[in-house]
Image (cartoon, rainbow, N blue to C red):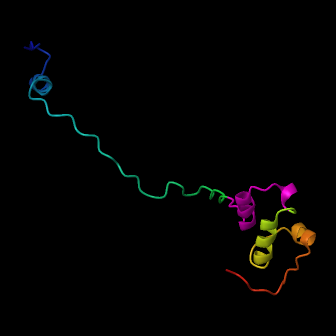
Amino acid sequence: MHLVSPTTRGSEVAKSNRAEYYRGAMAEPAAQPRIVRKRGNPNWGRPIPPARVLPTEFETQVRQLRLTVETYVSSAELRSWCERNKNRVYVPEWLLDEWDIPVDPNSCDAA
């Protein structure tokens, strides 16, 4: 119990009694933390990250055939693929020149 001093006011005693009451068995349960949803774009004002570099179809074909640059010219499968796709996808010019494969610049074999 609190002792009331002559300088203590009645409202201060009432406040301290309420504080003891709330700390006891009748205390309110702790509030659950609220999830605050931030609004707006968090990337606003930041530069756009560079796009991933994807391999060309030629590079994909070379990887499937497990070829190295030194074995490009000797590969019959790669030569056949290049002849079929020369006007549609990128094929290195030096390789077309090596095999004497002409490319039609006016062709529209786009996929």
Q: Is residue 76 left or right of residue 6?
A: right
Above or below for 21 versus 110: above
Dominant SS type (magenta): helix
Q: Residue at x 82, y 87 (%)?
A: 106
Q: Is residue 67 magenta?
A: yes
Q: Is residue 4 above or below residue 19?
A: above
Q: Is residue 14 left or right of residue 99?
A: left
Quadrant location of residue 34? top left
Q: Position of residue 76 (x, y in %)?
A: 81, 66
- The quarter of the image holding the C terminus is bottom right
Position of 76 relative to 30 (above/below): below
Q: Nearer the viewer, residue 41 or 83?
A: 83
Residue at the front extreme? 76
Residue at x 8%, y 29% (from the top left corner)? 26
Question: Residue 54 appears in which quarter of the rendering?
Answer: bottom right
Q: Position of residue 109 (x, y in %)?
A: 73, 83
In this rendering, the count of numbered labels is 0
Where in the figure is residue 67, as x and y percent of width and height?
78, 56
**Residue in view at x 90 percent, y 67 percent:** 94
Q: Which residues are magenta?
A: 53-72
Q: Is residue 59 magenta?
A: yes
Residue 87 percent across, percent down from the top left:
78, 79
